[in-house]
Image: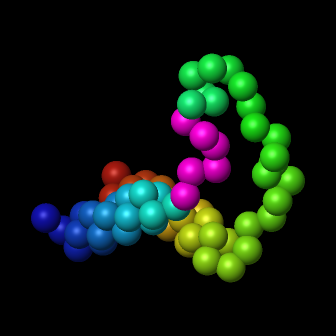
Amino acid sequence: MTLIDFILLIIAVLLITLVVGQSAKDNAANAFSGEKSELFSHSKERGFELFLSRATLTLSILFIATAIIAML
């Protein structure tokens, strides 16, 4: 296992942890009934939710870049 593989593994675990830690924005029951809740559709992310969203985006870009480098 090379260093780049180890880095890719660490980024993947962190990314999975961040995605699991985020709260769901939709009710699961509405997904199966076809209804769409519009109550909180225009609310902005603030505080910790904004941090989680930005950290997830950053780690996902880093994961893709690292995976491309690992293939070379």
Residue at x-position 63% and y-position 20%:
33
Is any part of residue 69 visible from this angle? no
Residue 12 position, x and y percent, is: 35, 61
Q: Is residue 69 one of those drawn in magenta?
A: no
Residue 69 position, x and y percent, is: 40, 60
Q: Tell me if residue 46 comes above or below residue 32 in the rendering.
A: below
- Residue 45 in the figure: left or right of residue 57: right
Q: In the rendered view of the protein, which quadrant contains the C terminus?
A: bottom left
Viewer-nearest residue: 19 or 63 = 19
First to last magenta residue range: 23-28
Residue at x-position 68% and y-position 20%:
34
Residue 7 position, x and y percent, is: 30, 71
Residue at x-position 86% and y-position 53%:
42
- Residue 8 in the figure: left or right of residue 48: left
Res 26 quadrant in image: top right
Residue at x-position 60% and y-position 40%:
27
Residue 47 position, x and y percent, is: 68, 79
Q: In the rendered view of the protein, which quadrant contains the N terminus?
A: bottom left
Q: Looking at this rendering, what residue extends furthest in the right direction? A: 42
Is any part of residue 64 visible from this angle? yes
- Residue 63 in the figure: left or right of residue 36: left
